[in-house]
Image: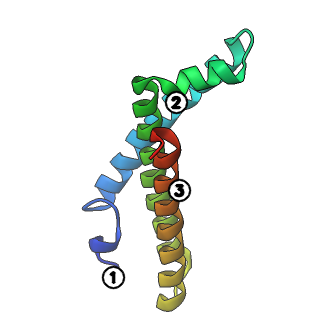
Amino acid sequence: MVTSITSFGRSGLYDWMIQRVTAGVLLCYTIFMIGYLAFGADLSYDMWKGLFEGTAMRIFTLLAVLSFAAHVWIGMWSVSTDYIKPTGARFLFQSACGLLTFIYVVWSIQILWGV
């Protein structure tokens, strides 16, 4: 039996709810970005830079990045526990996914906030 310590939430129900909430955040962000790209008259570097200089957009993007990280972690954890039966291989796979997700989040924060 797999313990809930390795999952993101406290149980399968919490993981399911987290995935639904993060999917909603990602949907809102995607719709916003598609709308901005589709209806931005002369999309230039200055417009793009101006969009991401606003604190609200940075926070919205950070929320989308964190939602993506949580969504990916829960999804990859679920897939790996279902389909990768050898414990060592599953541990390596989950470790690699966790490390890559962490790197992605840190890199995104550096890009967004110019740290």
Q: Which residue is mark 3?
A: 104
- Measured from the top left, where is residue 95 in percent x and y? 48, 76
- First in residue order: circle 2 vs circle 1: 1
- In space, the residues marked 2 and 1 are separated at their CA atoms by 37 Å
Q: Secondary structure at mark 3?
A: helix
- In space, the residues marked 2 and 3 are separated at their CA atoms by 17 Å
Badge 2 amino acid: Tyr
Mark closer to the observer (2, 3): 3
Badge 3 amino acid: Tyr
- Measured from the top left, where is residue 86 in percent x and y? 52, 90
- Left/right of residue 102 with respect to residue 1 in the rendered view: right
- First in residue order: circle 2 vs circle 3: 2
Q: Secondary structure at mark 2?
A: helix
Badge 1 local density, few (<14 within 10 Å), some, or many (20+)?
A: few
In this figure, which colouring scheme has been used for the structure?
Answer: rainbow
- Left/right of residue 35 with respect to residue 17 in the rendered view: right
Q: Which residue is mark 1?
A: 1
Q: Which residue is mark 2?
A: 29
Q: Is residue 79 visible?
A: no
- Measured from the top left, where is residue 35 in percent x and y? 63, 18
Please give the name of the residue rendered at 48% of the width and 44% of the height, measured from the top-left corner.
65
- First in residue order: circle 3 vs circle 1: 1
Q: Is residue 32 above or below residue 17?
A: above
Q: Secondary structure at mark 1?
A: loop
Badge 1 amino acid: Met
Mark closer to the observer (3, 1): 3
Please give the name of the residue rendered at 54% of the width and 65% of the height, measured from the top-left corner.
100
